Image (spheres, rainbow, N blue to C red):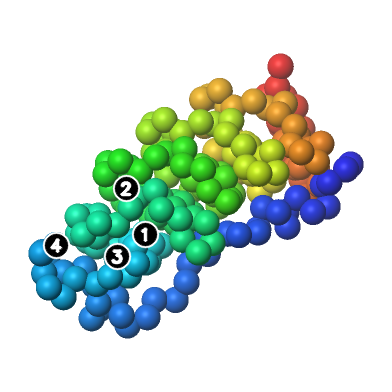
């Protein structure tokens, strides 16, 4: 099967992995007022938003937005605050970012926020994103869909959610793989058979 051997490598590339948090978040956190003369630089404010999203610091999110941080900005790896929160499993932070206007389908280097959630298996966060309008068929740069990610890593509950929200079971990525072939590439014949039963 063409391209299946490197699919998992692509899925792991550019992941918004949780990073260590330095002590600066304690003594350089967002000020209580956006008029504070000690306000950090715009660049630092943006960095703090990414860090807050990555570690699930809900208390920092709104003050940072009020101080000028951009919800749709990308960090050095190409990820938005929403991608960082969703990938790292922070459900309440995800909800807050969506309430503040973060785009559920925001396009990043790793695809949509839903793509990373399906990779990691965060069902409740996947539901939040779909409820907020996330497209179950949005593709990443390799032509992969959220359902392909869920199939690759065996997340049946997420597959059920995606299919019930219009995910295409027969979509094919740029390397010629569909969800069934991706499951088989991981040696998961049970998943592959189940996917075939789901299909038309």
Say if residue 115 shows up in the picture. yes
Expressed as whole percent of the image width and height from the top left, the position of residue 134 reads 46, 33
Q: CA distance from mark 3 to mark 4?
A: 12 Å
* Sequence-wise first label, 3 or 2: 3
Q: Quadrant of residue 189?
A: top right
Expressed as whole percent of the image width and height from the top left, the position of residue 89 reads 44, 55
* Sequence-wise first label, 3 or 4: 4
Q: Which residue is mark 3?
A: 42
* Sequence-wise first label, 4 or 1: 4
The answer to which of 85 and 165 lies nearer the viewer is 85
Within 10 Å of disc 2 (Cα), the crowding (few <14, some 14-19, many 20+) is many
Q: Which residue is mark 1?
A: 53
Q: CA distance from mark 1 to mark 2?
A: 9 Å
Q: Which mark is residue 34?
A: 4
Expressed as whole percent of the image width and height from the top left, the position of residue 129 reads 42, 38
Tag 1–tag 2 contact (CB < 8 Å): yes
The answer to which of 130 and 46 lies nearer the viewer is 46
The answer to which of 100 and 193 lies nearer the viewer is 100
Which residue sits furthest top?
200
* Sequence-wise first label, 3 or 1: 3
Residue at position x 56%, y 23% in the image: 166
Q: Which residue is mark 2?
A: 97
Residue 175 falls left or right of residue 101: right
Within 10 Å of disc 4 (Cα), the crowding (few <14, some 14-19, many 20+) is some
* Sequence-wise first label, 2 or 4: 4
């Amino acid at each position: 099967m063409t391209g299946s051997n490197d699919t998992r490598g692509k899925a792991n590339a550019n992941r918004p992995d949780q990073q260590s948090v330095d002590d600066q978040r304690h003594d350089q956190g967002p000020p209580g007022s956006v008029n504070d003369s000690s306000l950090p630089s715009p660049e630092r404010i943006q960095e703090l938003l990414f860090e807050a999203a990555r570690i699930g610091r809900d208390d920092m999110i709104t003050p940072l937005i009020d101080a000028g941080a951009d919800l749709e900005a990308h960090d050095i790896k190409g990820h938005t605050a929403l991608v960082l929160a969703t990938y790292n499993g922070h459900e309440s932070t995800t909800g807050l970012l969506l309430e503040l206007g973060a785009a559920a389908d925001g396009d990043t280097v790793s695809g949509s926020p839903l793509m990373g959630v399906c990779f990691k298996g965060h069902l409740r966060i996947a539901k939040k994103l779909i409820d907020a309008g996330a497209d179950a068929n949005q593709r990443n740069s390799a032509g992969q869909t959220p359902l392909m990610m869920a199939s690759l890593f065996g997340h049946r509950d997420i597959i059920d959610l995606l299919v019930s929200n219009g995910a295409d079971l027969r979509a094919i990525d740029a390397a010629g793989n569909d969800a069934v072939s991706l499951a088989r590439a991981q040696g998961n014949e049970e998943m592959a058979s189940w996917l075939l039963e789901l299909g038309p």
